[in-house]
Image (cartoon, helix red, strand yellow):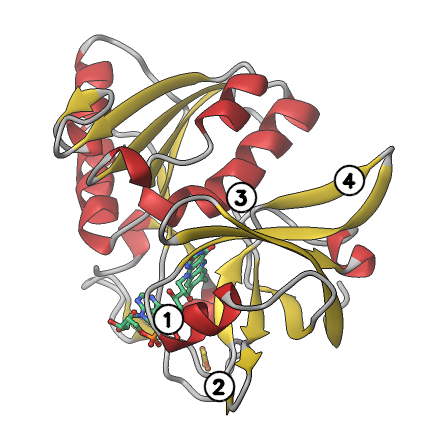
Amino acid sequence: MGLFQKKVSILYNIELGPVYYRLGLAFPELARVVKPGQFVMIRPSHASITLLRRPFSVHRLVVEEDKTLGIELLYKVVGQGTKAMSEMKAGDDIDVLGPLGNGFPCLEQANCVFLVAGGVGVAALYYLAFHLSKYQGVTQTVFLGGSSSSDILCEKEFQSLGIKIHVSTEDASVGEAGLVTSAVEKSLEAGERPDIIYACGPQAMMKAVGVIAGAYDIPCQVSLEAEMACGFGVCLGCAVKRAADEGGYFHVCIDGPVFDFRKVKI
Ligand SMILES: Cc1cc2nc3c(=O)[nH]c(=O)nc-3n(C[C@H](O)[C@H](O)[C@H](O)COP(=O)(O)OP(=O)(O)OC[C@H]3O[C@@H](n4cnc5c(N)ncnc54)[C@H](O)[C@@H]3O)c2cc1C
Ligand code: FES
């Protein structure tokens, strides 16, 4: 599969709320090969700063009148790099490297899956949901969780795919009060039985989802985050411990970012 690196034009950079943005990038050749769960490294450059590249999941493809124009990222402003990205405008050029990483394994025999997203973790899961709907006709339930209503993203997009949605917020501003993991547990207790659970979000959330899945003997794939300097296996900065019985380390950028929960120690 091809790996591309070039300066591409920003199609749009839309603010969704105080800290979330959708960034459209004109990159059709990458869009044609990227798989759900893969990511790109973006070098934010703005005014006087140019930083190391930062990793972002591909959120969806930008398609107009059946023509694939590029990819869209969904990102949260958390520091210098994402702040610089948020200040870029349509027509600006931005350096992009990708697609990188392994992507989500899509079980051929899966009829029913759970997708569990914490906050901006939904970025990676939406493209997976789209893929599973369009190409595999899989029945899906998505669990969207966040601290508050502003952290609940992409509800309409999941609705338009006909996917059942559970929303949970810690401050009870929308959906059920509490953690997204409680909603997952309730559904399993009620007898729902997905063939696989995919999770992306804060590490503690993914760990909790993995443990719950294990208790029901359901395979669970988690998309891990790590600070990354290169994105392709050279700097060794993104190490994550393998599960105790295996020992050693994986590197999130080349062995992941998606892992079988049982294989990693998080
Ligand atoms: C494979 C992968 C996919 C990702 N996909 C998305 C996505 O789709 N949307 C999105 O908003 N974010 C995503 N992230 C996280 C994103 O890369 C970081 O938020 C970004 O690099 C922060 O850059 P910054 O310069 O703004 O923050 P910095 O100034 O570098 O750091 C600000 C704070 O964020 C923490 N941080 C920085 N990088 C990461 C990281 N990679 N993981 C966890 N914490 C970090 C730092 O420890 C610090 O506390 C992804 C990360 C990985 C590894
Ligand atoms: S980010 Fe450099 S090895 Fe993974």
The disc at residue 105 is 3
Q: Which residue is drawn at 70% across and 70% down?
A: 92
Packing grade of label 3 (10 A; few <14, some 14-19, many >=20) is: some
Which residue occupies the extreme top position in the image?
A: 190
Q: Earlier in the sequence, mark 4 or mark 1?
A: 4
Per the model, the C-alpha gap separating discs 3 and 4 is 24 Å
Badge 1 is on which residue? Answer: 250
Q: Is mark 1 on a helix, strand or loop?
A: strand
Per the model, the C-alpha gap separating discs 4 and 2 is 30 Å
Q: Which residue is drawn at 69% across and 60% down?
A: 90
Badge 2 is on which residue? Answer: 51
Q: What element carries label 4?
A: strand
Frontmost residue, 195 versus 125: 125
Q: Is residue 122 visible?
A: yes
Per the model, the C-alpha gap separating discs 2 and 3 is 32 Å
Q: What element carries label 2?
A: loop
Choose mark 3 or mark 4, whichever is in front: 4
In the rendered structure, the answer to whether residue 2 lies left or right of residue 218 reads right
